[in-house]
Image (cartoon, rainbow, N blue to C red):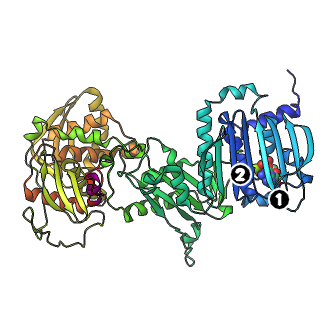
Amino acid sequence: MTIHILPDKLASQIAAGEVVERPSSVVKELVENAIDAGATAINVDIREGGRKSIQVADNGQGLPAAEIEVAFHRHATSKLQTVEDLTAIRTLGFRGEALAAIAAVSQVTLISRAQGETTGTRLVLDGGAKVSREMAGAPQGTVISVENLFYNVPARLKFLKSDNTEKRLIDEFVTRYALAYPHIRFRLAHNGRITFQSTGNGSVLDVLIAIYGPDVARQLLEIGDSRLEIEGDSPISNLQSPISISGFIGTPAVHWSNRGQMVLFVNGRWVKDNQLTFAIIQAYHTLLPTGRYPLAILFLTLPPEEVDVNVHPAKTEVRFRGDKAPFAEVQRVVREALVADAPIRQMGAWQVGSQLEAMTPGWEGSLDQHAFVRPDDISQPEMELEWPPEEIIEPAGGQTAPRPTAARSSQLPVMRVVGQVGAAYIITEGPEGLFLIDQQAAHERVLYEQYHGEWQAGQVAMQPLTVGTAVTLSPSQSNWLNHQLPTLATIGFQVEPFGPQTFMIRSIPQLAADRDAAHLLLSIVTGVERKPPAAADLPLYLIQLVCMAAATRAGQSLSQPQMAALVQQLEQCHDPMTTPHGRPTFIYLSVAQLAREFGRI
Ligand code: ADP
Ligand code: MG
């Protein structure tokens, strides 16, 4: 084959592929154009998942009659004049590609009347070629209908998913833009049925209620404006870009099995950013059950020149100039909101008959696992809990004496121990309801915070063994252990190789001093074998495993002072609500909920 220049039509179809991948990309481009045109109401009507037709109607400024045809040319835009403009984009569109791309791969009808003009224009295009143009009566604004998408690109057509999947993607897109633009009234209809609408009253929370329903909306924490001040003339603070973050995040009580509910907008543009998503996940670290993801709708605002949006034709990725700043800032605001406003929430297990995926994380299941008493657990040595000397232990049923509150985190109220059920759960009473505490989970959390603190300070308390304990491992286990001896030393295990596949344990962490050393080491080795963590997470994971092995078990009856001590230590934890690996430590039943369950209200 000789080299030749591609015919214009083919070149446009290739270029179109980058902008228009599927029906939802058409919706995205048309809705962005409507927003850029200053619309206050946007209606999206799709048929058959958008495959048959997509119509977007807006009441924005409209296209002047003289510009209607040129708008469909490639690189035709009213939003960019010079190359300098590219460094500070304030509109959603700027590449002048969308209308051309959409028209190249579908049959388009556009009706528009510009502000100040008395009649509108109808333009019909087929595969990008003009079919007809005429005057038409129309209200101010623009209606674009895109029919038979990819009718002339069979290869693309084949990649489309079911109507339902395409519809879901469109739905996701429209609801997200409704969140970012709460002042705009959005309506989405599929095959003539309205599936979503927002009021345009300016309240993000109202849009969230429209999307997720009131049950989830009740579990949201608002993140306020957190503009970083550029202070004085410190060189470091000058490096930081002024960034403001607002939005809503879910409490740890709502979570999903995928990452789809973490939504980020940068300067009003919905973007996908793995790093920032990871920042959110990290902020929830140890607060959510493993494999579950939070809800977070965050709006980042920063000077346009700090963000490069011209990364990809679809404009869903951005680059930040000061790469790290938004990451740390996102993590900080989310974490702060979680810690500051972590009221005791009513836990999912009590939401009888709840339809919400978010509310049914399978806690009931994990609770059951721990509810039965294993015979070998009963013979566990008595756990030792320390409590401060000033502790006043109240007899059951007595009045709760005020306790010094200085060192307490505000997350849990002061509780009074009522008793123990099933040798596994401690019942306590708080000011507004009762708590059912999983003694094992609670103790794991208590141990973790102590141990983790020691480890961070580089001073894990160790219990030397007077006579070393030897353990023999499998070849792969001993290979792993041989490589991890220094890491183990940092968490209190002094272990030496002692012949092929055999190791001698010289010390174990103090907080597990009453456990069998060989058993303890084995539980770590097999824990890592079962579920190997990322290298960077290894020390924390090992700490969690030790805590699991060292915690008091279900099946062990506790004395009143032991329960009181455990409860008090839990109250003082920084993150008392879950175990380090995300199992809840307690279930809360408020007085109001009790009344509801009993049909009193
Ligand atoms: P871009 O949005 O990148 O400028 P598009 O191909 O999406 O490129 O649109 C080309 C031009 O057509 C826009 O710059 C704008 O002037 C005009 N336009 C497109 N859609 C609308 C609309 N809904 N209302 C008013 N003008 C529009
Ligand atoms: Mg556009």
Other residues around mark 2 within 10 Å, as few (<14) / some (14–19) / many (≥20): some
Q: Position of residue 264 (x, y in %)?
A: 56, 53
> Is 510 drawn above or below residue 20 in the view shown?
below
Which residue matches tag 2?
32
Query: What's the residue at 8%, 57% (across, down)?
Result: 560
Q: Is mark 2 within 8 Å of ligand 2?
A: yes
Residue 563 in the magenta stretch? The answer is no
Q: Quadrant of the C terminus?
A: bottom left
Query: What's the residue at 92%, 39% (across, down)?
Result: 132
Q: Is mark 1 within 8 Å of ligand 1?
A: no
Q: Quadrant of the N terminus?
A: top right
Q: Is residue 75 visible?
A: no
Nearer to us in this view, 275 or 145? 145
Nearer to us in this view, 364 or 516? 364
Q: Disc 2 residue type?
A: Glu
Q: Secondary structure at mark 1?
A: loop
> Is 203 drawn above or below residue 527 in the view shown?
below
Q: Disc 1 residue type?
A: Thr
Q: Which residues are magenta?
A: 592-597
| Horizontal side, residue 353 vs residue 148: left or right | left
Other residues around mark 1 within 10 Å, as few (<14) / some (14–19) / many (≥20): few
Which residue matches tag 1?
82
| Horizontal side, residue 113 vs residue 359: left or right | right
Residue 37 badge: none
Q: CA distance from mark 2 to mark 1?
A: 21 Å
Q: Position of residue 89 (x, y in %)?
A: 72, 59
Give the mark nearer the N terminus: 2 vs 1: 2
